[in-house]
Image (cartoon, grey):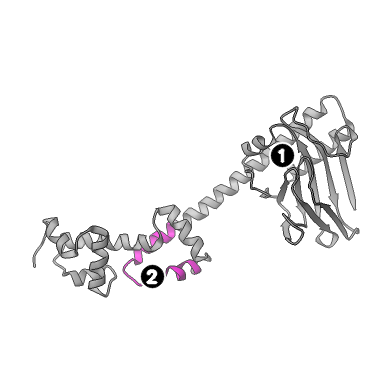
Amino acid sequence: MYLNSGYLHNSHIDFKDKSKPLVVGSCGTYRLSRHPKLPTYRPRGRLDFQIIYVCAGTAHFHFDNAENDTVVSAGHMVLYRPKEFQKYEYYATDKTEVYWVHFTGGNVKNILRSYGIQDDMRVLYSGASMEYERIFKRMIYEMQRCQKDYEEMLVLLLRHLLILLHRQLTRAHILKNEYLDGEMDAAAQYFNDHYNTDISIREYAASRGMSISWFIRNFRGYTGLTPAQYIISIRITTAQMLLETTKYTVSEIARIVGYENPLYFSRIFHKHKGFSPSEYRKCSGKTIGK
């Protein structure tokens, strides 16, 4: 096992310090090769905050209780807050390599929020970058050397780390939104092209690799309507246009917009427009003929 670490004032005791907005207490790295397992168990947590960066392999975290087992892969960071239950293990067979930093301060929560880290976030997608490793190594070096103003340098290095993480979180959010917008736009276009056919929302979602509940929730967020409501709105709008500008009968219009049963079509139309199709045609004043 390879271990390299540094501690503020060479003290291994965790502490809480609210005299400054941000204080870095310790930093280090572990790399397992022959040592089979490195477990950590702190049922009452620590007094400070901790970020663990998994830069290689995987690590096992048990959030909230010992029974939960969350496998965190390389390219992620885990954030522990003060007094949170901590239980995690690194295994040599997983070729685990991690970096960690402990920090405290009187304004930590707001500082984390300013970098896009909300209070309920635990596992953060950071991506794998040598820049993270360089920052951690520099923090270790500063703590081991204890040169003039090193405490301030440690804070600057931690903020550098948080800035890079914020950029990655923002990039990941943008990519996620681009994917989501693309999927919802494609779904809306599909419904526009096939609104008069028998569309199965469940089958469409499955064809795109999405659960039905996830798809409905996000489609509604994108359009303001559920998929079923969206399809009905297209059918009713098209029916309005046909009632105003053509000589088609109500039954013919029902079939054109996707309803085989004209009575059902009339009920749906009345529900949404407040008139039956025939009444709407009369009220529109644009009847083409009988």
SS at badge 1: helix
**Which part of the image, by quadrant, shows the C terminus?**
bottom left
Q: Circle 1 sits on which residue? A: 161
Tell me if I can see residue 35 in this picture: yes
| Circle number at residue 111 | none
Residue 87 rendering spot, x and y as whole percentages: 79, 54
Q: Is residue 158 left or right of residue 146?
A: left
The question of residue 205 being in magenta is answered with yes
Disc 2 vs disc 1: Cβ atoms closer than 8 Å?
Answer: no
Instruction: Using the rendered view, name the quadrant where residue 236 is placed.
Output: bottom left
Q: Nearer the viewer, residue 206 or 41?
A: 41
Which residue appears at 82% of the width and 36% of the height? Answer: 15
Residue 141 in the image: above or below residue 207? above
Q: Which amino acid, mark 1?
A: Leu
Residue 49 is situated, as x and y percent measured from the top left of the image, at 75, 41
Answer left or right for 254 relative to 30.
left
**Could you tell me residue 100's position as x and y percent?**
79, 45
